[in-house]
Every structure is written in structure tokens, then in C-alpha cells.
Amino acid sequence: MAKASYAPMFETVSGALNKINKKSPHAADQKMVLTTHRKAPTTSPDCSRVYLRGLNSITRSTPVTAKELTNRTKFAAVSAAVNTRMADTTQRPTDLAAFNLQKNLPNGKKTLRSYIWSLEAAAYDAAQNG
């Protein structure tokens, strides 16, 4: 079995080192190099793995469902609303005050962005259902 050794600053590489350009006419000939690093306690020193993946293993084989399209639409709308609201300087003091009141409560949102996201998601759901 081959063993890969990384430079000391890269000893815990994890993720895709290069990807396949799906738009290329040579996409079928390309390989994706994927590395993983296991962080669980183990007696083996070999905790890194390297995989080569082809185009077939990264291409979706099932069609997009209606539920996925609905979730994508909701995510796009809520994300845009959150970005707009975060950039609005007139509403920021009000949002910050409301966020600070709830952040230490049980189930309180710990970041301002997640708090605003919950508000905008609730508003989106109310607009779609009501």
C-alpha cells in the first residue's frame, strides 16, 4: 500500500485537492483527488486516506425532487432577505437589541445572523402559508 506524507504544515489535509471540471470536454478523463483525515483516537498512525474519484462517482444520478426545489427556493429567498436586513443600518440597532435579549435564553440564537435568519425564515413561511 502506498503512503502519502505531507509537509508538516499540511499534515491534516482533508477535502478535495482538485476537482473535475464538468464543463470540460475531457471531464470523463479527469480524476478528483479527495483526502480524509480521521480525528478519532486510534492505535494506528495511518489516519489519512487519499481517494481518486471519477466523473460517475460525483455526478448526480437521481432527478431533483419537488421538495428539493422548494427548499432551494426558500433558502435563496431567506438568504437574500437576511443579507438585505444585515446591510440595513436603520434596522440594525433594533435587531441587535432584540438579539441581545434572547441570546442567553434556552434555545436562543447565539449569533446575530442566525437570529435574523430565524426571523426571516418565519416570515417566509408565514407568507407562503398565509
Image: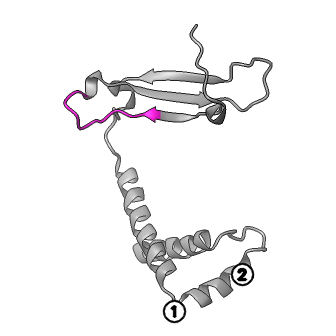
Residue 51: x, y in percent? 50, 22
In the displayed structure, would residue 30 be above or below residue 16?
above
Residue 124: x, y in percent? 45, 73
In the displayed structure, would residue 126 be above or below residue 43?
below
Label located before the other in sequence (1 or 2):
1
78 horizontally vs 101: left or right: left
| The quarter of the displayed image where residue 58 is located | top left
Q: Which residue is mark 2?
A: 100
Disc 1 to disc 2: CB gap under 8 Å = no
- Please rate how many residues cluster around mark 1, counting C-alpha atoms within 10 Å: few if below 14, some from 14 to 19, many from 20: few
- Residue 48 — which label? none
Q: Which residue is mark 1?
A: 90
Viewer-side residue, 128 vs 112: 112
- Please rate how many residues cluster around mark 2, counting C-alpha atoms within 10 Å: few if below 14, some from 14 to 19, many from 20: some
Tell me the residue at 72%/81% (across/down). Answer: 100
How are the colours assigned in the image?
Answer: one colour
Which residues lie in the magenta part? 17-26
Judge whether residue 47 is colored magenta.
no
Residue 26: x, y in percent? 22, 27
